[in-house]
Amino acid sequence: MELTGRLALVTGAGHRVGRAIAQGLAARGMDIAVHYNASEEPARATARSIVALGRRAEIFPANLAERGTPAGLVNAVSRKMGDLDVVINSAAVMMRTPWDSVTETEWDDMFALNLRAAFFVSQAAAMAMRDRGGAIVNIADLAAYETWPAYIPHGITKAGIVQMTRGLARVLAPAVRVNAVAPGAVLLPDSWTEADGRRLAETTPLRRLGTPDDVVSAVVYLLEADFVTGETIIVDGGRHVRG
């Protein structure tokens, strides 16, 4: 897919990796629908940075964990900005939930945003794109492949994203390609210390942490690679091959 002049919806684009993806796609000539939930000012800052690159940007508030909201978001973007070409499902929550204290509410909240919302955003977008073609990239997580004892529900949602990617790639072909990126440590949680980061880097085969730009590069590859669908690229410095 040629990216210049195309329109992408990036969910969770107000901060962290979502923002980096939105800015990275704009730098490659795309117009961006910037979705956010509670982070309005960060989303506006993302949009301003995109406009500064000479591309169109609009912000779209939506709590994607609420039923019916994902389709409403896609429809709002189409009405205001035109036909969608690309969807990046980046919105997610990562909660520390030791297995013996996780609550049903925490479980439901994570699944509603991390997995259900991504599916129904994709469903609505694919219905609109199937006559013209398009691409979807889901943001999974290394937790889909590793066992993190304090993040079991989170890991299950991200494993679900990987399987969802495979299933949608099958049913939406040939018109819409669906792939995923599973980042490792590219941005540390706010609560982590520098020492935590050093320990993580020392146990990573490439001996460093990643950056959001590493994720952006993988997303761009998947959008431009017209013969790739159903694939998940792990961007983790080799942590998943440690044995």
Image (cartoon, helix red, strand yellow):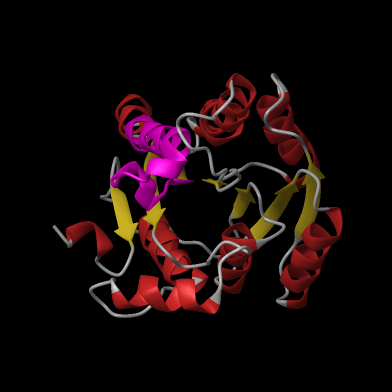
For the point 57% across and 32% down, the residue is: 110
Give the magenta range. Answer: 138-165
Q: Give the quadrant of the N terminus.
A: bottom left
Q: Quadrant of residue 74?
A: top right
Q: Quadrant of residue 52?
A: bottom right
- Place of residue 242 in the rendered image (x, y in percent of width and height, measured from the top left): 17, 62
Q: Give the quadrant of the C terminus.
A: bottom left
Name the outermost residue toward the front: 100
- Place of residue 16 in the rendered image (x, y in percent of width and height, measured from the top left): 62, 62
Name the outermost residue toward the right: 41
- Place of residue 71 in the rendered image (x, y in percent of width and height, measured from the top left): 67, 26
Instruction: Tell which of 232 and 194 is nearer to you.
Output: 194
Q: Quadrant of residue 152?
A: top left
Instruction: Tell which of 197 and 171 is nearer to you.
Output: 197
Magenta-span inclusion, residue 61: no
Above or below: residue 5 compared with residue 91? below
For the point 79% across and 62% down, the residue is: 42
